[in-house]
C-alpha cells in the first residue's frame, strides 16, 4: 500500500535563476528518504515541488507511476510537517488534527475515532483540548506530525521539522518520528541540513549541493565511501591530503614522504605518479611515538572528551589535521613529535579535482553516478 | 502551478481595482479635468486661468500662506508638547498615567472644530472666563480669534498623535541602549539628545506628517475661530459651497493645488522615514523611575497641566450640555436636560441614527475590502495587485473636503447619480479610512507565516477555503481592533460629510457644526456629548478586546 515516488529530470526556475536542473531520483515504497545538504542547496525547493507549492518547469514527478505535476496541492494527498510546525493558532489540538479530515467529508464519528487514534500514536492524547499557545515546542511538533499523517497521505514530507527544538528534544523527537514512520509504513521524504540527524533517521540519504544530487545511498555507504570530496567533508569530518600514487614491489599504493601504504583497491585508471586527494577521517589515523616510519607530525593541542581524545597536529608542511584516538592511560602530550599511519582499508582516495572516488569499492553502492 | 483558486483571486483583484478606479481615480480625474477646463465656452478648451486667478490675487493666495503659518506653528507646537509628554510618561512613574493616557486619546478623537467652539465658549468674546475676568478684575483678555486660536486648538488637538507615535517608539527602545550610553559617559540630558531623540525621530516624523496633513486640510476650526484669518480649506469650502459667487472650476483648481501640496509632503516624509529607519524590538523596555525633587514638580505639572488643557474642551462641552438655555443661545444658569430633549427627542432628527448606521456600513465595507486588499498585496503579488496597492493609498493624501467635492463632481448625474444619498456618504467615509485599514491589515497578515496557509492546503483545503477558515480567523482580532479605531474616527468625520450631506443624511458632526453656526450652543453641546460618549464606550471596548494594547491610528 505504500507508494513509490519517482522524480524524473525535474527543473526549477525562479525568474532567471535555474535552481534545479534535470534532477532525478527514485524513492522506494515505505522508505524513509532524506534530502541532506547545506542551506541553499535546493532541498527545500525540491520538497516544495513534490507537494506542489513550487511549480515544476521541466520533467515529471510521479507517485506510483501517476504524474502529479498538474494536480493542485490540496488534491495531492500528501502530508507535510513544516519547519515552524504551522499549527493553526486559533484552533485546539483536536481541531488542528481534524482539519484535514473535515475537508474530506468524513463522518463525525470516524473523525473523532481517527483523531483519538493518531493522538494516541504520537502520545499527546491528554492534550486534545489544549490551545497551541499552551503547548511546548516538542508537543507542537507532535501535533504537526499527527495532523499530517491522520489524513492517511500517500506521502509524508518533512521540512527541517526538528530545527526549532533544543538539542535534547531533537534526539528524542527524531527517534519518535522514525518509530512512527516505521509503524505506519508511509513513504517519507525528510529535509534537513543536520548530517547527524540524517544518519540517525534515514533508510537512504541523497546529498544535495548546488541543486545537484552528489550521492544517494544508505547512511553507512555515504559515510564509508563518499563519492567525492564534497560528500567526504560534508558528512563527518575528513582531513584532506594531497599526494601521489606510488608503485612498490608491483603493488599500487600511496606515498606520504617516506611513508608508503599499499592501496590494493585503487581504480585501474591510476598510474605511478597520478596526483590524488586522500580523505582520512580523524579516527582513521593512528598515532604512535615509537614508530620510525609514518607521516611525521607535531601535536599542537589536544581536547580530552572522555571516551576519546581529539588531537590537533601540524604536519611537516605546515598543514593542520585532526585525529581522534581512544583515551589510553598513556596518550602523547602536547609538543610530542609523533608518526601517523593510516587505516588503509577505510580511507578514501579521489581524483586530483576531487570529483571521483578512486577506490573500486567506492562504486559498490547503488549510487547512480552523476 | 495553476489552480482554480488563483483565478478567483484574479477576479477579486479586478473587481477591487474597478471599485477603486470608480471611487478614487474617476472623481479625482473629474477634479483635474474641471480645473483646466474653460467654463464660459461651449467647446472643450484647455485653460490655466483658474490657477492664474489664484496666484494673481493676494485675496486668494494669502490663504495658502496663512495655512502654512498655522500648520507649521501647530505641528511644531504639537511636537514640542507630544514629545516630552511621551518621554515623561514612559520614563517616570506618574500616578494615574493609565487614565491620563485615555484622556489624551479621547481629546484627540473628537473633531477639532468642537475644540474650537469650546475654547470660544471659555475665552471668546462672550466666553465664560472672558466675562468673569473682565467684570471682576477689569482685565483685558487677549482675543482668541484668528491665528492664536487656530494654533491653540490644533496644537492641543494634535499633540496626542505625536504622543502616541513617540510613545510607541519609546516602548520598543531597549533600555540597554540607554545603559550603554550611560556607561560611555553620557548624562541623562545627553542621552535624550544623542540616543533617544534620534531613535524616535522616524516615528516623530511620521506623526508630524499626520498632524501636518490633518491641520492643513481641516476647515471646521479656522471657520469657527479664524474669523478674518482665512485658511486654504476655508477658501475651498466657500468657493464651492458659499452663498455668493461659487465657482466649480476655481474650486477644482484649488483642490488640485492642495493635493499637489499633500502629495509633496507625503513623498518628503517617505524619503525621510526611509533614510532614518531603525528596526527595534526591546527585550527590556525603559524602566519607569520615581522622579525626585524639582524634577518631580515640573514633570507632574507638565503632564497633568497638558492633559487638563487637552480635555478641557470636552469637559466644557459636557458641562454646558446640561445648562438650560433660553432660545438655545443664552444660558440661564440653571441645570437641566432640555438640550437633550431638544436633540434626542426632536422630530425628523436622524443625525444620531445616521451616524451609527453610516459608520457601521462604512466600517463593514472598509474591513471587508481592507482584508481582501491586504491579502492580495501580501500573498498574491502581481502587476494588478501592485496597482491596487498604490491606488488604495491615494485617499491618504486627499483632504476630506476635496474628496467630498470630487464625489459631487463625479456622481451628480445619471447613470452615477449618488449625490444626496446615504450611499455617497458611506462611500466617502469608507474611502477616507481605507488606507489606514489596509496598512494595518497588511501588517497583521505579514505576521502570519505563509506555511500555516500551506499546511491547510496540504491538508486538502482549496485556497479560498484556507483564506476563509485559516487566514481570516487569524487576522480577525487585529482587524477588529483596527475597525474600532476606524469607527471612532469615522463618526467624528466632518470635512467630507459637510459637503455631501442633505437634510436627510445629516450626521452628528454635521449637526454639531450646524448648531454652532446657528449659535445654538445648547444643542451643539448635547450632540457633542453624545459623540464623546460613543467614542469613550468604543475606546473601552477596544481596550477590552486588545487587552490594553497601545493605540495606533
Image (tube, rainbow, N blue to C red):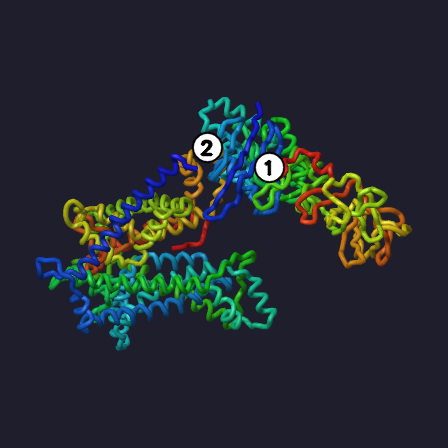
Question: Residue under mark 2: which chain is it in?
Answer: A
Residue A322 or B366: which is nearer the viewer?
Answer: A322
Q: Residue at x 36, y 48 (%)?
A: B383
User: In which quadrant of the rendered image does the C terminus of chain B lie?
Assistant: bottom left
Q: CA distance from mark 2 to mark 1?
A: 20 Å
Q: Give the total number of marks visible in the rendering.
A: 2
N-terminal of the pair, mark 2 or mark 1, is 2
- Asked if both marks, 2 and 1, belong to the same chain, the answer given is yes
Please name the residue that numbered disc 2 is placed on. A74
Residue displayed at 41% across by 49% down: B442
- Chain letter of mark 1 equals A
Q: Is residue B324 above or below residue A354?
A: below
Q: Quadrant of residue A149?
A: top right
Task: Tell me if I can see residue B518 in this picture.
Answer: no
Residue B514 drawn at (x, y percent): 19, 57
A29 with respect to B67 (left or right): right
Q: Nearer the viewer, residue B149 or B489?
A: B489
Neighbours of disc 2 within 10 Å: few (<14), some (14-19), many (20+): many
> Helix, strand or loop at disc 2?
helix
Q: Which residue is mark 1?
A: A190
Give me the disc on residue B101: none
Image position, residue B295 (x, y; %): 50, 71
Asked whether residue B463 appears in the rendered view, the answer is yes
Tell me where residue B213 appears, x and y as whole percent: 32, 62
- In terms of secondary structure, where does tag 1 sit? strand
Residue A169 vertical position relative to residue B274 in the rendered view, above or below: above
Closer-to-camera residue (B174/A326): A326
Amino acid at each position: 500500500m505504500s507508494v513509490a515516488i519517482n522524480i524524473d529530470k525535474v527543473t526549477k526556475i525562479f525568474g532567471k535563476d535555474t535552481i534545479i536542473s534535470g534532477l532525478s531520483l527514485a524513492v522506494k515504497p515505505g522508505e524513509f528518504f532524506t534530502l541532506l545538504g547545506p542551506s541553499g542547496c535546493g532541498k527545500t525547493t525540491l520538497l516544495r515541488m513534490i507537494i506542489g507549492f513550487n511549480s515544476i518547469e521541466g520533467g515529471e514527478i510521479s507517485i506510483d507511476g501517476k504524474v502529479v505535476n498538474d494536480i493542485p496541492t490540496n488534491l495531492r494527498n500528501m502530508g507535510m510537517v513544516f519547519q515552524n510546525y504551522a499549527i493553526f493558532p486559533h484552533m485546539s489540538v483536536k481541531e488542528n488534527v481534524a482539519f484535514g479530515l473535515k475537508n474530506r467529508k468524513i463522518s463525525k464519528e470516524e473523525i473523532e475515532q481517527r483523531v483519538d487514534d493518531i493522538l494516541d500514536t504520537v502520545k499527546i492524547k491528554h492534550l486534545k483540548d489544549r490551545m497551541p499557545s499552551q503547548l511546548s515546542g516538542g508537543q507542537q511538533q507532535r501535533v504537526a506530525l499527527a495532523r499530517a499523517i491522520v489524513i492517511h497521505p500517500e506521502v509524508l514530507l518533512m521540512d527541517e521539522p526538528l530545527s526549532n527544538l533544543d538539542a535534547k528534544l531533537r534526539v528524542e523527537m527524531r527517534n519518535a518520528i522514525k518509530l512512527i514512520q516505521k509503524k505506519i509504513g508511509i513513504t517519507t521524504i525528510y529535509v534537513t541540513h543536520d548530517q547527524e540527524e540524517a544518519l540517525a533517521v534515514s533508510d537512504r540519504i541523497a546529498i544535495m549541493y548546488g541543486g545537484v544530487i552528489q550521492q544517494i545511498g544508505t547512511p553507512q555507504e555515504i559515510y564509508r565511501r563518499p563519492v567525492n570530496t564534497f560528500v567526504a567533508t560534508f558528512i563527518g569530518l575528513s582531513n584532506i591530503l594531497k599526494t601521489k600514487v606510488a608503485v612498490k614491489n608491483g603493488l599500487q599504493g600511496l606515498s606520504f614522504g617516506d611513508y608508503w601504504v599499499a592501496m590494493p583497491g585503487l581504480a585501474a585508471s591510476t598510474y605511478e605518479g597520478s596526483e590524488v586527494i586522500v580523505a582520512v577521517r580523524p579516527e582513521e589515523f593512528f598515532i604512535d611515538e615509537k614508530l620510525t616510519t609514518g607521516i611525521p607530525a607535531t601535536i599542537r593541542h589536544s581536547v580530552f572528551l572522555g571516551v576519546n581524545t581529539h588531537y590537533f597536529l601540524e604536519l611537516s608542511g605546515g598543514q593542520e589535521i585532526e585525529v581522534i584516538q581512544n583515551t589510553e592511560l598513556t596518550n602523547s602530550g602536547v609538543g610530542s613529535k609523533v608518526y601517523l599511519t593510516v587505516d588503509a582499508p577505510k580511507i578514501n582516495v579521489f581524483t586530483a579535482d576531487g570529483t571521483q572516488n578512486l577506490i573500486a569499492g567506492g562504486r559498490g553502492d547503488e549510487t547512480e553516478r552523476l | 502551478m495553476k489552480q482554480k483558486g488563483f483565478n478567483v483571486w484574479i477576479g477579486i483583484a479586478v473587481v477591487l481595482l474597478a471599485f477603486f478606479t470608480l471611487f478614487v481615480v474617476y472623481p479625482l480625474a473629474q477634479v483635474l479635468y474641471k480645473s483646466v477646463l474653460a467654463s464660459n465656452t461651449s467647446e472643450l478648451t484647455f485653460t490655466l486661468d483658474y490657477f492664474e486667478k489664484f496666484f494673481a490675487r493676494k485675496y486668494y493666495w494669502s490663504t495658502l500662506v496663512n495655512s502654512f503659518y498655522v500648520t507649521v506653528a501647530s505641528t511644531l507646537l504639537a511636537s514640542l508638547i507630544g514629545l516630552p509628554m511621551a518621554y515623561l510618561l514612559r520614563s517616570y512613574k506618574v500616578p494615574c498615567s493609565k487614565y491620563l493616557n485615555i484622556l489624551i486619546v479621547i481629546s484627540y478623537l473628537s473633531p477639532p472644530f468642537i475644540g474650537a467652539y469650546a475654547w470660544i465658549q471659555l475665552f471668546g468674546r462672550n466666553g465664560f472666563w472672558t466675562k468673569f475676568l473682565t467684570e471682576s478684575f477689569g482685565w483685558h483678555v487677549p482675543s482668541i480669534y484668528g491665528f492664536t486660536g487656530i494654533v491653540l486648538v490644533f496644537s492641543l488637538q494634535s499633540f496626542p498623535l505625536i504622543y502616541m507615535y513617540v510613545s510607541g517608539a519609546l516602548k520598543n527602545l531597549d533600555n540597554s541602549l540607554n545603559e550603554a550610553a550611560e556607561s560611555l559617559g553620557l548624562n541623562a540630558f545627553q542621552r535624550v539628545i544623542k540616543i533617544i531623540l534620534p531613535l524616535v525621530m522616524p516615528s516623530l516624523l511620521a506623526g508630524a506628517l499626520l498632524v501636518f496633513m490633518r491641520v492643513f486640510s481641516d476647515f471646521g476650526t479656522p471657520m469657527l475661530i479664524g474669523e478674518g484669518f482665512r485658511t486654504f480649506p476655508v477658501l475651498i469650502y466657500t468657493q464651492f459651497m458659499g452663498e455668493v459667487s461659487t465657482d466649480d472650476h476655481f474650486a477644482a483648481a484649488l483642490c488640485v493645488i492642495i493635493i499637489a501640496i499633500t502629495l509633496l509632503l507625503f513623498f518628503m516624509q517617505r524619503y525621510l522615514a526611509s533614510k532614518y529607519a531603525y528596526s527595534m524590538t526591546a527585550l527590556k523596555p525603559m524602566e519607569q523611575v520615581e522622579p525626585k525633587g524639582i524634577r518631580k514638580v515640573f514633570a507632574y505639572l507638565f503632564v497633568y497641566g497638558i492633559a487638563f488643557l487637552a480635555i478641557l474642551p470636552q469637559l466644557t462641552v459636557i458641562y454646558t450640555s446640561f445648562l438650560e438655555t433660553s432660545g438655545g443661545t443664552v444660558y440661564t444658569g440653571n441645570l437641566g436636560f432640555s438640550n437633550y430633549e431638544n436633540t434626542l427627542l426632536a422630530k425628523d432628527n436622524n443625525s444620531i441614527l445616521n451616524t451609527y448606521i453610516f459608520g457601521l456600513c462604512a466600517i463593514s465595507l472598509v474591513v471587508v475590502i481592507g482584508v481582501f486588499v491586504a491579502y492580495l498585496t501580501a500573498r498574491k503579488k502581481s502587476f494588478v495587485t501592485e496597482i491596487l496597492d498604490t491606488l488604495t493609498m491615494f485617499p491618504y493624501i486627499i483632504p476630506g473636503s476635496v474628496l467630498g467635492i470630487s464625489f459631487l463632481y463625479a456622481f451628480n448625474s445619471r447613470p452615477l447619480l449618488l449625490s444626496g444619498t446615504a450611499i455617497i456618504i458611506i462611500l466617502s467615509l469608507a474611502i477616507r479610512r481605507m488606507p489606514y485599514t489596509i496598512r494595518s491589515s497588511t501588517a497583521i497578515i505579514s505576521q502570519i507565516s505563509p506555511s500555516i496557509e500551506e499546511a491547510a492546503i496540504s491538508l486538502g483545503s482549496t485556497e479560498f477555503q484556507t483564506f476563509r477558515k485559516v487566514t481570516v480567523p487569524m487576522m480577525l482580532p487585529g482587524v477588529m481592533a483596527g475597525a474600532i479605531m476606524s469607527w471612532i474616527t469615522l463618526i467624528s468625520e466632518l470635512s467630507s460629510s459637510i459637503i455631501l450631506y442633505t437634510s436627510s443624511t445629516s450626521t452628528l458632526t454635521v449637526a454639531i457644526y450646524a448648531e454652532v453656526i446657528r449659535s445654538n450652543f445648547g444643542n451643539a453641546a448635547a450632540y457633542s456629548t453624545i459623540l464623546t460618549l460613543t467614542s469613550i464606550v468604543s475606546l473601552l471596548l477596544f481596550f477590552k478586546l486588545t487587552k490594553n494594547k497601545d493605540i495606533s491610528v
